[in-house]
Image (cartoon, grey):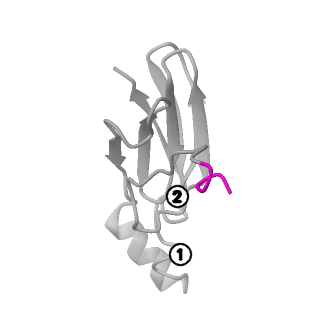
């Protein structure tokens, strides 16, 4: 219904099935951070398809191999699914991902 009434703008930035999991709204700067499978997107609230910034953050290859050896599905479980996007201060966001069952966290500078 929203598409038919032109009341929304769908995000067209990825057709790769990235399994979007977490969102962080930055109203002050007019941005939306989106955590997905192996990626973090930084989108404009005005038009989510303009000036899309993307960080590719996969799990380490050796962790993916260990995950597969443990019997997990390579496509749906053995990746770095971004689960936490938390403001840290005015310039950084704290980010955590599953890391193919070996969690990892870091800071992203939002310059």
Q: Is 86 part of what is drawn in magenta? A: no
43 or 65: nearer the eye? 43
102 or 111: nearer the eye? 111
Q: Is residue 44 left or right of residue 1?
A: left
Q: Is residue 77 left or right of residue 106?
A: right
> On the rendered image, what quadrant is the C terminus found in?
top left
Q: CA distance from mark 1 to mark 2?
A: 10 Å
Helix, strand or loop at label 1? It is: loop
**What is the x, y in percent for residue 50?**
34, 38
9 or 21: nearer the eye? 9
**What is the x, y in percent for residue 36?**
50, 54
103 to 24, vertically: above or below:
below
**What is the x, y in percent for residue 97?**
52, 51
Residue at 58% across / 20% down in the picture?
Answer: 27
Which of the labelled discs sits on residue 81, or is there none? 2
**What is the x, y in percent for residue 54?**
34, 44
Instruction: Please rate how many residues cluster around mark 1, counting C-alpha atoms within 10 Å: few if below 14, some from 14 to 19, many from 20.
Output: few
The part of the chain drawn in magenta is 1-5
Which of the labelled discs sits on residue 99, or is there none? none
- Number of marks in picture: 2
Q: Is residue 3 left or right of residue 106?
A: right
Q: Quadrant of residue 7?
A: top right
Residue at 33% across / 39% down in the picture?
Answer: 53
Residue at 53% across / 75% down in the picture?
Answer: 76
- Residue found at the far right of this picture: 1
Residue underneath mark 1 = 76
User: Which one is earlier in the sequence, the residue at label 1 or at label 2?
Assistant: 1
Helix, strand or loop at label 2? It is: loop
């Amino acid at each position: 219904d929203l598409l038919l009434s032109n009341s929304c703008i769908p995000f067209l930035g990825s057709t790769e099935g990235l399994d979007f999991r977490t969102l962080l709204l930055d109203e002050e700067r007019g941005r939306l951070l989106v955590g997905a499978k192996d990626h973090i997107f930084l989108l404009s609230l005005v038009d989510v398809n303009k000036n899309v910034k993307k960080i590719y953050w996969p799990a380490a290859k050796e962790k993916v191999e260990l995950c597969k050896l443990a019997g997990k599905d390579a496509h749906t479980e053995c990746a770095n699914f971004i689960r936490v996007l938390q403001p840290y201060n005015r310039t950084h966001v704290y980010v955590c991902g599953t890391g193919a069952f070996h969690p990892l966290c870091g800071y992203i500078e939002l310059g």
